[in-house]
Image (cartoon, grey):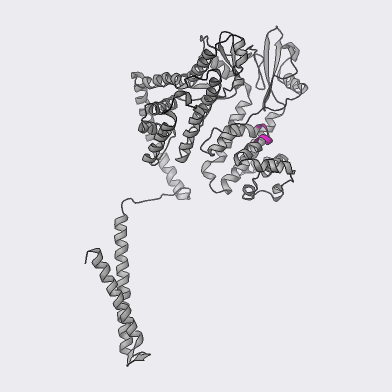
Amino acid sequence: MLLQRFSRWGRAVGHVGRYRVIVGVFLKYGYEDLARRLPLPKRSLWILPRARREHERIARLTPAGRLRCAFEELGPTFIKFGQLLSTRSQLLPTDYVNELAKLHDHVPPVPFEKIHEVLQNELEHPVNEYFSRIEPAPIGSASIAQVHSATLSNGTRCVIKIQRPGIEKTVRVDTQIMAQLATLLENHVEGWKVNRPTAVVAGFARRIEQELNFTHEAAHVERFAHQFTGDPAIYAPRIYRDISTRRILVMEHVEAIKASDVPALKNAGLDLRLIANRITHLIMKQIFVYGFFHADPHPGNIHILPGNVVCFLDFGQMGFLDRQTRETFAALILGIARKDESAATHALLKLANAELDPPRHGLEADVAEFMHLHFYRPVSELVFAHMVTDLFRLTNNYGLVIPPDLFTMLKALSLMENLVSKLDPGHDFIAQLRPFLNRIHRSQLQPGNILRHLSNFKSNAAAFARELPLEIRRIVAQLRNGQAKIIFRHEGLDPLDNTLERVSNRLSFALVLAALMISSSLIVYAKIPPLWHEIPIIGVVGYLVAGLMGFWLLIAILRHGKM
């Protein structure tokens, strides 16, 4: 463990130049206070002077806007990390989530000579044995790769997705520095430990490592194509596996029109309303039938072929939803559609894996208000993106954590709705959603599914019984080491507590009264001066105070009604 810690810090020291760049950018965008709360080297807190115009530009940005600009300036790894954070509503406020969702990874292209070197290093034989021509100008350039049109040696047109030179090293250095900064935040800034930034960064590192391996994307395309085998409404490009590697992906060139190019679609004689219906149907089928869906269906990734056939591109970001999550989400939407706030609230709590229910009545009231705002209006006025934003604001208010893949799915539906509304402004999104939800609901009542649930319950109960002794030992060990604590809170004992407090107060009062009487009597008996008519004045004052206190105690007892 100690060796691993030294190894991590050793790597961080080795990347000190990049470390200072990252810290410097965050300081530039106004994070000085956070930096001073971390045990960073003093030199890393130097703030470089900024031009007045640059200072004014940053001052005009919102806090969320400053974070987005910092991520954009730090490059590919941080852009991807910001995109990930935009799907984690439990970590950041809604305005930050919405701002980070605007992050795009379009960057200047790499010179073709360097791209050609990557191709040559990845392929077993010379490039000209595979391709008769490669267009030097890219048709797309992103943070991790860029895309070039090409022609195979047999004359077939294709496109090549080629990883940018040195991007793997850049990503690994940045993720290591992120891990160190996350550790500092978790250990030195109050309130961050509960969000577990180290776990978030570790998950991001695993995800981007997979994205850097193009064999995963090839598998995504093939699985996607297999799901829709025989469906004439959709087309997935062919992957040339024998030429593709972990750093290059060769796929079929598809001549199509971008789905958002409405004039071109009309000129081609295509049916915009049919296209809108097909895009909606296909994405919902991906989500609610297969649980494997395109997570980034923006207009650049959806093209239209002759015959109104929909073609999806760029399968680097895919979403996964298990059967239980799909069923619970269907129950949530059906509860909302039926105006049943109790059923919708129950589904929302189950969806968020809430270990302890929040105030049920307050949550149900807020769910009812949410339903009133979005579903008691004409369908043409319903904006799914606004509905999603309000739903996550509601869950944040109650500390409910929505699973990241579900958030990704809702973002995908929002992107789809934005595209479809341009193709057909009167498109009824909810009408196409309802049959899928009803299908999921009906499937739960089938005998096979009931038996499956019973079998799962039996397996879970057996696993729980096996793991219970180990969990108890783990809890006891945490209590012994001070890593956990038990808090007891009694309910309904307030009246008893008040009675005991009143009794103890009266006893104390009576003791003070008795002490005054005794001490005053001793003073009078001893005739301690000063005297008035041979009577000690202090003793007289003591008697008077004791008399007032006794009278006060008697009134309190009579007022309470019990002697």
Is the residue 545 above or below the residue 491 in the image?
below
Left or right: residue 460 versus residue 118 is left
Q: Residue furthest top?
A: 154
Q: Residue furthest bottom?
A: 534
For the stretch drawn in magenta, what is the main secondary structure? helix
At a point 32% along the width and 58% down the height, the residue shown is 497
Q: Position of residue 234 (x, y in %)?
A: 54, 12
Left or right: residue 383 versus residue 205 is left
Of the 4 image quadrants, the one containing the C terminus is bottom left
Q: How many marks?
A: 0
Q: Quadrant of residue 79?
A: top right
Q: Nearer the viewer, residue 193 or 123?
A: 193
The answer to whether residue 20 is visible is: no
Q: Quadrant of residue 510?
A: bottom left
The answer to whether residue 245 is visible is: yes
Q: Residue furthest right?
A: 113
Q: Nearer the viewer, residue 536 or 558?
A: 558
Q: Position of residue 562 (x, y in %)?
A: 22, 64
At a point 68% along the width and 10% down the height, the residue shown is 157
Of the 4 image quadrants, the one containing the N terminus is top right
Extent of the magenta region: 71-76
Q: Is residue 251 magenta?
A: no
Q: Position of residue 321 (x, y in %)?
A: 48, 25
Left or right: residue 82 versus residue 360 is right
Q: Position of residue 318 (x, y in %)?
A: 55, 24
Q: Is residue 72 magenta?
A: yes
Is the residue 461 above or below the residue 284 in the image?
below
At a point 64% along the width and 26% down the height, the residue shown is 212
Is the residue 265 above or below the residue 417 in the image?
above
At a point 58% along the width and 30% down the height, the residue shown is 207
